Image: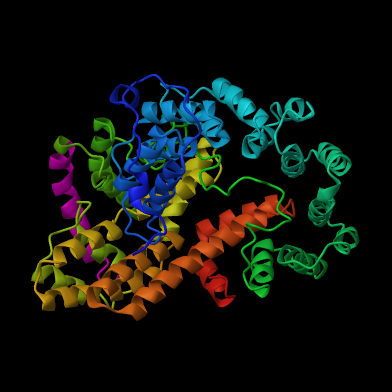
Amino acid sequence: MRTGVSSRACCCWQAPEWERTSPVPRRFSRPPATPAARACSALASLYEIGQGVELDKARAASLYQRACDQDWARACTNLGWMRSFDSGAGKADGEQALQLFVRACEAGDVLACRREAQAWQCARGVPVADMLQAMVRYRAACKKGDAASCEWLASRHSGEESILDQNGAVKNLEHVELQAAIEAARFGRKGRAEELLRRVEGSAPELKRKVAFVRACLALDAGELERARELMSGLPDAPAVRVLGRLVEARKAGVKSWTPAMTRAWVAEGRPDLRGSFFLPSTRELEHDWGNCGTPRERRSPSPEMDAVNGFLQEYSDTLAPLATAPVSDGMLAQAITRVEDARLAVRLAALEVLTRPALTEAQRKKAWPIAERHLARLAEEHPDNLFFKLWATLGPTKEGPPLTEQLVDRLEAMVALRFQPPLREVYDAFRTVQDQAGEDRAPAFSASISVLLGPRYTEAAKTWEEQAKTAEPELRQRLGRALVALGKRISEGGWMVHVFQGASVTKRGAAMIGSEQDAKAASELMARGRRFYGGVDTLGAMGSWPLSAFTAEWLDRVSTEELTFYTELAEAGAW
């Protein structure tokens, strides 16, 4: 398949070996990057996400490295981000990632400056997290014009005023001030928000409409509906304005549940992609990693009222749930071997996720896997009509699943009529209880629940079987493909949104085996609808301050505790 970028364009100058392997970040000393370097980076981004080409993280990393060696700073940044995690292109290397961020930041890529700050915040490439060092780097990135870093500072009331008040010290100053105004309003600093909006009006008349839109959002947030309408009356017709108008009407009608109100408003306007809207004040890209380190936290001592079992769940939530590749200590493994016998289903599942994690060492696997296989089989016997348990028992403790055989396909075919019903409520409630005892909010409980319920690795197994099927008998390959299509659809019908994506991926691989363009298209459309839905939610939040705090709390609560019902409602509303 053509990508529009030829790999031949990348076969140009490479840095000498001593420079490419030097542990000391070097400054860019040659002229700006060539078009070939940019072409390498563009091609790498396609391989990184599988857009128009087969997903190939290793090749993406190699191409980013080549472009980085040719002095294209953004390629260094992107490679550093891949090196920050176990991205499928080799093991995570925080130190190398940090060096790449430093190098690209010095070359002028403000995203790299922010990534460098995040590295200090999240202890990536440095021994321990250091918020002071992170703060210094966020401030530097803000001064260089990175709006997201200014937002980060504004959300913590740390240094944003002193930096923004240095007129001209920040690139894209007016855009940054608009977003900082929203951040200030979110945290109740309405005087500061209005000060920033007046400043933008005075220094950038061309942004007057953006200011009016933000003020309308703030008026809606405050319940000043006539004021919101007045501000909107001077704005041109656009999807973002129409969505805001619908929300004003919903508020007037007494709607108090903002999640369905926002969903209905967005759907009624045809689910527009608002990321490129003129009215969005922020200039930064939407990022799902913002404010989330995705790294294990320091293990905390259990609170006095917490028993040993809940202490195990807390340690799991702190040290393993944030990162799938986090190593499992021998002490944690010993706890999991004990807790897998617990009476509570949520505790047993958390223990099984530990016993089947890909990050286990070879010695740990020899100890854990036989126990995991026995208990997975037991759960399947206890829940004979639930595809979640039956399929996990079939996959077993390995990441790739069992080898492709006729017996395996027989088992898969026997499960296609079962309903996929992961124990969402039980798992979330267990972690929520632990977080309440520890004085945490509900977000870590949600993260830990997802980690547990992603224990069965359907997509990895389907990928392995698809590869093995290439050398199998045609009849067996067809049977496997049909089974994966059916199972993928079942997975997508139940569970959380992550299961929707997983199921669609399994269906797509099965469709490729049997040559079903219809099923492949349906799976791709389902994944695209899910992405648009999440993208719509993200951008609605970015549009302004309308009751964002209420929306966020309601959203998280419903997603966490009533996900099946919630997504059914949204599907009926046409959200995805």
Give 332 or 438, whichever is nearer the viewer.
Answer: 332
Question: Residue 226, position in %: x, y?
Answer: 90, 62
On the question of residue 34 being in view, the answer is: yes
The part of the chain drawn in magenta is: 364-386
Q: Main secondary structure of the magenta part?
A: helix
Give 286 or 372, whichever is nearer the viewer.
Answer: 286
Q: Is residue 131 above or below residue 179?
A: above
Give 84 or 329, whichever is nearer the viewer.
Answer: 84
Residue 342 belongs to magenta span: no
**Quarter in which the N terminus is drawn:** bottom left
Question: Residue 493, position in %: x, y?
Answer: 40, 72
Q: Give the left or right position of residue 435, taking residue 296 as reference.
A: right
Q: Is residue 443 above or below residue 414?
A: above
Residue 377 belongs to magenta span: yes
On the question of residue 124 being in view, the answer is: no
Q: Residue at x 80, y 71 (%)?
A: 253
